[in-house]
Amino acid sequence: MSKRIIKLIENSNYSDREFQALYSLYKYRCLSFDQIYALHYNKSKLGTRDVDTGYMRRRMAQFKKDGLIEKMSKIEKDCPPLFTLTTDGIKVVRTYFNLSSDNESKEDGIFATDLTYAEIKVEPKFAFHQFYLNCFAINFNKMFENVNEFAYVDERHMSKSQNIRPDGLCVIKKQKVIIDGQETFIPETHFFLENDMGTETITKIRQKFERYRAFLDSSKHDPNIRIVVLFICKDSKLSVKECTDNSLVKAYQENSGIKRRVKNIKKAVAEAMLDYVKDNVEVFVGTQPKLLAAIKCLYLPEYFGMNKKSLLPDVSSVLARFNNVDLEFKDVDKLTKFTNGVEYDYYAKSDVYHKSFIFLEYFGDPMSVIHKLELHKKNTLAFRQAMHRELNLVIIANKEESLIALNEVCELSNPKYNAIMYTTVNRLKQLPLEQALFQFTSYGTATFKDKFRTLVPDNTIC
């Protein structure tokens, strides 16, 4: 190592915070001023008070003077100014944090070794893509910052031995937690981040998911590892400031253009690998706010010893109003032997309507629910043969908007979905069961009345 690099580390007036800031530039490859500030300089060193940007501006000026960072040029005009490490900056980071090949490769072959300036450098035409990816990754990392054994790697930092290379990868090692007084294990989870700027064709996106299918079929995939693919769609309606600080996003509504994009990508997923989206494999497609909200509600609680449904609507208490009236709820776990091993959330039989029902929560729009829709008749064949009655599937969403979007992806008026009904938490709270449940038809939607024998048009949905 050159004397200059050693001198910069040993004799400079940099504190550990400055080296951490440089490490973030190494980790994320390029960052805006606001991103560096939010990561390292928005609080005092003791974290007791907010600070302005003046101190960081002086630190950035010193980084430039010492030849450790540089401002990217020729990037898109809508992209904020971005900073990246120089060759000396990379050497300082690798020396200070002892990032040798041996140390980096110990994480099961996930991390790459000895990246050069040319390998870490972001080409100007990809700068905006990298910025938006980092916006999501930083907000995601903040969410999990207190979770043990959490790591994030950019695509360039992944080992070349990986035969699937998403834009980013978040890894959480297997965890032991206590939930409701019971010791339980959360499997190792890999969140694959795919950043979509709306420029790739749907054909290319379908090919991308075909590669995921090949990965899941390969020896590189450990079936004990939970795989969650997050396909992040850029919405031009969100400002750069909102993307940098997701807490600024309030009552966010997606525009019609991004809704079409999300719908088409979901169709591509369904065509390429839907039969693999089950068990330990999940796919979410949406904008940054929607995906972060889904992960916060569906995955984050269990890492802090909370019931995994603690941040979701309490569906069980909502359904309780129908127990011993319209429905008689049974142990859902005993049903799996009749459903080809597929798991559901609730099970009930009804002597009033001479039907049986399985209920499935649809919060965060997970693609695995579409898989269960597609295979409902096949998965419930054993039940129909043993019990001589139809097993009706009820999809419960938080908002009707989610069900309308699901209909646009799957065309739920198709006769193959005749045994499937839909509802929302509010409909279950406010309406009788036969009005709370509805189906999609060729002319809109219809609720079930007259003991489920007659479809009655209902214009309250769409």
Image (cartoon, rainbow, N blue to C red):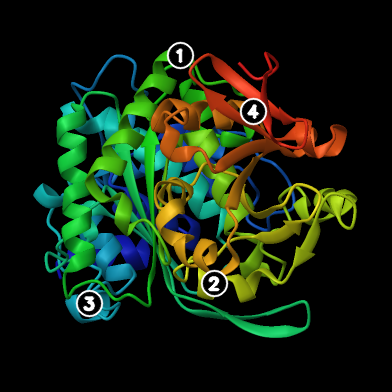
Whole-Å distance between the Cαs marked 1 and 4?
Answer: 16 Å
Q: Name the one closer to the observer, 289 or 210.
A: 210
Q: Residue at x 78, y 83 (%)?
A: 181
Q: In the rendered structure, which amino acid carries the disc numbered 2? A: Thr
Q: Which residue, given by chain and number where applicable, does mark 3 sit on?
A: 105
Whole-Å distance between the Cαs marked 3 and 4?
Answer: 47 Å
Q: Could you say which disc has been placed on residue 256 in the image? A: 1
Q: In the rendered structure, which amino acid carries the disc numbered 1? A: Ser
Left or right relative to 337: residue 221 = left
Q: In the rendered structure, which amino acid carries the disc numbered 3? A: Ser
Give the mark nearer the N terminus: 2 vs 1.
Answer: 1
Please, is residue 200 above or below residue 340 in the view? above
Give the mark nearer the N terminus: 2 vs 3.
Answer: 3
Q: Are marks 1 and 3 in contact (CB under 8 Å)?
A: no
Left or right relative to 436: residue 282 = left
Between label 4 and label 2, give the one nearer the viewer: 2
Residue 13 in the image, given as x and y percentages of width and height: 44, 57
Q: Secondary structure at mark 1?
A: helix
**Which quadrant of the view contains residue 276?**
bottom left
Whole-Å distance between the Cαs marked 2 and 3?
Answer: 41 Å
Q: Could you say which disc has been placed on residue 400 in the image? A: 4
Q: Are marks 2 and 3 in contact (CB under 8 Å)?
A: no
Q: Secondary structure at mark 3?
A: loop
Whole-Å distance between the Cαs marked 1 and 3?
Answer: 44 Å
Give the mark nearer the N terminus: 1 vs 4.
Answer: 1
